[in-house]
Image: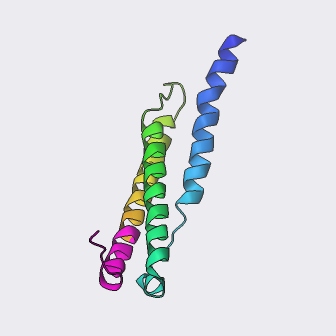
Amino acid sequence: MNLNSTTASPLALMIALFLVAGCSSIGKTIDPAKYDSMTCTELNSALGDVARDISRTAITRGKVANTNVPRWLLGGARVKTAIANRETARIDRLKQQQQAMVAVRANKCPRSTD
C-alpha cells in the first residue's frame, strides 16, 4: 500500500504542472504602443512586475527540469521537456516585453543622477 501513495505523487505533479504550464503559455503579444501612454512610475512598476514574473517562471522551470520522473511513467520525460520548453518560451516573451519597456523608459523618463 505504501507503494501506491508514493508512486501517485509524481504522476499528479506532472499532470498539475502540465496544466499550469499549458494555461500560462497561451499567447500574448507585445504591444509597445501601450507603454508609450504609461508614466515613468507606471513603467518602473511594470518593469518590476515583469522581472518578478521572469524570476518566478525561471524557478518553476528549474523545478520542472529537476523533477525525477519514474521510468514506468510512459511519456513522463516528454511531458517534463515540453513543460520546460513552454516555460523557456514564456521567459523569452517576458524578456522581450521587458526590453520594450526599457526602451520606452529610456526615451521618456529622465535619469536621476543622485
Of residue 52 and residue 81, the one placed in the foreground of this image is: 52
Q: Which residues are magenta?
A: 97-114
Magenta-drawn stretch contains 63: no
Side of 82 relative to 17 (left or right): left
Quadrant of the frame with the C terminus:
bottom left
User: Dominant secondary structure of the magenta stretch?
Assistant: helix
Magenta-drawn stretch contains 98: yes
Q: What is the x, y in percent for residue 76?
A: 51, 36
Point 48% across, 48% down: residue: 83
Q: What is the x, y in percent for residue 84?
A: 43, 47
Q: What is the x, y in percent for residue 104?
A: 35, 81
Up the image or down, 53 lies above or below 4; here it is below
Up the image or down, 5 lies above or below 78; here it is above
Q: What is the x, y in percent for residue 30?
A: 44, 76
Point 61% across, 50% down: residue: 19
Q: Quadrant of residue 65?
A: top left
Of residue 67 and residue 109, the one placed in the foreground of this image is: 109
Side of 101 relative to 70 (left or right): left
